[in-house]
Image: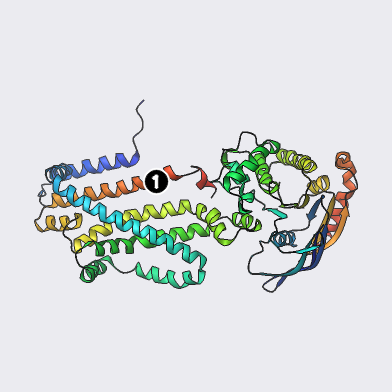
Amino acid sequence: MLEVIGLDVRAGGAILLEDLTVRLDAPALTCLIGPSGCGKSTLLRWLAGVLPPAHAAAGRLVLDGQPAAVPHPAIGYQPQNDALFPWLTVAENAALGLEVAGLRRPEAMARVTPMLAAFGLDGTAGLFPDALSGGMRQRAAFLRTMATEARWLLLDEPFSALDAVTRIRMQRWLCGRLAVQPRGVLIVTHDLHEATSLADRILVMAGPPGRIVADIPVPLARAARTEAGLAPLRETLKTLLLEDDP
Amino acid sequence: MFPRPHPALVLIVLLLVLWEGYSRLSGVSPLVLPGPSGVVRALIADRAAIGRHGISTLGVAALGFSASVGFAFATSVALHFRPWAARGLIPLFVASQTIPLVALAPLMILWFGFGLLPKVLLVILVTFFPVLLSLLSGYAQVPRDYVDLLASMGARPRLIFRRATLPAARAAFFNGLRISATYAIVATIFAEYAGARRGLGIYILAAKNSFRADLVLAAVVVSAALTLALLGMLHLIDRVTARNPLAGRHA
């Protein structure tokens, strides 16, 4: 279990997050939704250990009952953009996390190369990211995160840059991948369709200062989810999101 | 179908034709304004001397430029990790760029004599700042996501610099090199003009003193050719060392 306890984040005079407590189960896919500026990305960035230096944060991280510090090797972070380095090949990009963890490049490459096929990247090891489609780039970014020892994945709007069809394909692909390689996943998204069709659980945030206003489990199994079946849940979420709207 | 000629080539040929026409038809003395054909004749006739001086100029410029790039790189790394030092030093570097070469070149000769040192120092002074500035602005352009990604993996600042910041600054660095390379030859010639035993600068001074406008212009042609050669070499280094030729579009 990943627990964030009593997290306060301040920037200048502004309070971005106040006494925020979240518990995430592994393996489960949790979506975090909320209006822009409510602090979703701030929470994600704190967990990833990449808050800007001007932000003052106080709070505790507990991983499987043990106090932990950020950044933590068990937590993998994927920024909004796929952040593939254009000067590295697909395999080198995928091996980056392992290299930072201390492996030499040849060892790291040898570790990720056999995984390329499972991520739909067969034959792309030596290509540069420019040569890949949007979906393939995203899968290469997932491989980079999932090749490491990270048991938790923080994904900041991972599908927002993709076209509608690729987005649906990638959502399905991710669910399939997580069934094979289970991880605790926290996805920040603005898309209610994405949240309701992917998540095991949806956290609704409001703010600033950011706080969790609802914690809603999605009762249906993913395969059993239909547009009609999810409509009431989406209505509930819409009502929650518009609650603060004047 | 003939391939379309490069616009710059067309313009140069047009200017040369106009120049040749004017020098022949206007009645102006060839001592004052020789035509391009006269310049080429002078260049061929005095090729041994111009070649000797040109090689000397290229040597000094290359040495000064290489040293300058080395210093600029070391300084840029130091300033990147010590932003307070950058805030203190950058205004000083900017001020150093406002010193006129006309004042600086004779002072260098006065302080350091007629040898290699004053000329190399002058080239360094002139070319250092553009390279330094291009590197620092290149470092600042590294996408935030790249830095965050590595930081979230637990990478320390030095590793983040080596793996993300430095490669992301590559395009800006080469732009700075190209700007500085054009200054390198000019600065060397200026230093030689102020006092030297060899080099295109002293050759131009001697030619001017003997009222040989054709030889002055021949030296100008050679200096332009040297600058183009330097730029060509940089282009080649850029091409050969590029890992992904398209990387600049996203970096």
Amino acid on which the number 1 mark rests in the picture: Ile
Residue A246 visible within the image: no
- Name the chain letter of the residue that bears numbered label 1: B
Q: Does A234 sit left or right of B34 as displayed?
A: right
Q: How many marks?
A: 1
Q: Nearer the viewer, residue B51 or B227?
A: B51
Residue A233 coordinates in the image, percent (x, y): 88, 49
At horizontal 58% and vertical 49% (from top left) the residue drawn is A104
Q: Does A232 sit left or right of B139 as displayed?
A: right
Q: Quadrant of residue A122?
A: top right
At horizontal 55% and vertical 48% (from top left) the residue drawn is B250
Residue B24 coordinates in the image, percent (x, y): 13, 43
Q: Nearer the viewer, residue B102 or B37?
A: B102
Q: Nearer the viewer, residue B112 or A106?
A: A106
Q: Nearer the viewer, residue A36 or A125?
A: A125
Residue at the limit of the structure toward the top, as seen here: B1
Residue A240 coordinates in the image, percent (x, y): 85, 58
At horizontal 39% and vertical 68% (from top left) the residue drawn is B94
Residue B169 visible within the image: yes
In this rendering, is residue B69 above or below A226?
below
Residue B101 coordinates in the image, percent (x, y): 27, 65
Q: Does B73 sit left or right of A93 as displayed?
A: left
Quadrant of the frame with the C terminus of chain A: bottom right
Mark 1 surroundings: few (<14), some (14-19) or many (≥20) residues within 10 A: few
Disc 1: which residue: B237
